[in-house]
Image (tube, grey):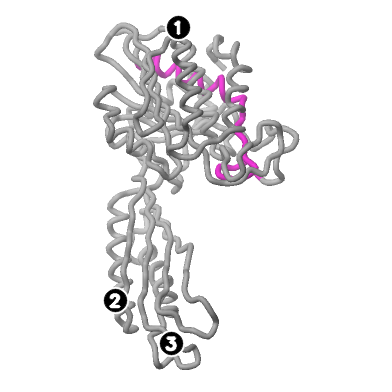
Amino acid sequence: MNLVEQIVEFHAELSAFRRDLHARPELKFEEFRTADLIAERLAAWGIEVHRGLGGTGVVGIVRNGNAARAIGLRADMDALPMTEFNRFGHASAHPGRMHACGHDGHVAMLLGAARTFATRREFDGTVYLIFQPAEEGGGGAREMIREGLFDRFPMEAVFGMHNWPGLKAGQFAMRAGPVMGSSAEFRITIRGRGTHAALPHNGVDPVPVACQMVQAFQTIVTRNKRPIEAAVLSVTMIHAGETTNVVPDTAEIQGTLRAFSVETVDLVERRMRAIAEHTAAAFDCTASVEFERNYPPTINHAREVEFCRSVAQELVGADNVLDFEPTLGSEDFAYFLLEKPGAYVVIGNGAGEHREEGHGDGPCLLHNPNYDFNDELIPIGASYWVRLAERWLAPR
């Protein structure tokens, strides 16, 4: 591997910092301590710091030479509202909060690059170090943009990176086009007329109507959507009634939709509304549909992906840079890519062998209570950030 030697030298310090963040996780828009620690370190290295975008966001600025050229590098900071099963020394000290997606490691990798930029300015332009809050459902990227991220810090392109369990440590994967799905949530309330369960003819039962809808919704995916377009429509909650001998007044259906294109989301929403309305009417009920669009699909730009691929190949070798298989999980880096050219790549986190004694019995997967970030990635990911910035901002 063609790692940056300076980063390798302070690998242990970065690992300790990462483990400190892991032990003290903070949820979306509550990353106060995390942001303080990041800002303190950036300032100690002589890096200009701006705070407050998106609430707890931190932006570090490293300038050298050409003021007209700039790129952005992003790391997310927040943890998840879940209980950790690991029992090793740096396990979460806060029940119900856990760094189960590796954002602690993402912060450490970008800080490793920042420390290098502070002393080794082998680029001609400006590097913006974006430490973003609230990726996990809060839309922190969207909030930073709304509060002027790209107006205050104009950049040519923006880049993101996420660890990926199952991919070998030291490997990268990427592709142009859609890499992560959009996410949307729906809630459908069916209103009938309650009655005694022994006298159903005196009421209008919303429960079988809900069952009909759940079955009918799957025909949108199998019969309305083009087969080559990916989408997953999952009903994950059905709520109705409070006791066994009462037909309830209402039934509620909730779930999620994932897709790779806005057009597919439009189609599914339109058909869901029609099915809900007409199915309810057929049973003498009414239905209301709430459809909330969360994150858009994450769509990489081809030029920037090829640039990232060449950087990663130089770093770890061509055999260790793979094509990424798209996933219908969602990622709010998508908002950045709607505004600026860029690319979102993944770096292998391994299969879990790196976890220390006291880890949980389950797999080392994202959003799993047995997960832990692989500290061996820190010099690799930090070196990738340094090489990428130096190549992009090479003197012309």
- Give the structural element (helix, strand or loop) at label 1: loop
Q: Nearer the viewer, residue 248 or 60?
A: 248
Q: Where's the N terminus, which quadrant?
A: top right
Kindly report the distance in space between the C-alpha atoms of the residues bearing marks 3 and 1: 75 Å
Q: Between marks 3 and 2, how big is the CA–CA gap?
A: 23 Å
Which amino acid type is shown beneath numbered disc 1? Answer: Arg
Q: Quadrant of residue 279?
A: bottom left
Earlier-in-chain disc, 3 versus 2: 3
Counting residues from the N terminus, which is met first, the one under dot 2 or under dot 1?
Answer: 1
From the viewer's perspective, tell me whether residue 74 is left or right of residue 1: left
C-beta proximity under 8 Å, tags 3 and 1: no
The label on residue 120 is 1
Image side of residue 304 versus residue 323, left or right: left
Q: Which residue occupies the foreground of this view, 6 or 201?
A: 201
**Residue 195's mark?**
3
Residue extent of the magenta highlight: 363-392
Q: Residue at x 42, y 69 (%)?
A: 252
Q: Residue at x 68, y 46 (%)?
A: 362
Query: From the viewer's perspective, is the residue at label 3 or at label 1 nearer?
Result: 3
The amino acid beneath tag 2 is His
Q: Amino acid at mark 3?
A: Thr
Dot 2: within a 10 Å radius of its alpha carbon, few (fewer than 14), some, or many (20 or more) residues? some
Above/below status of 356 relative to 231: above
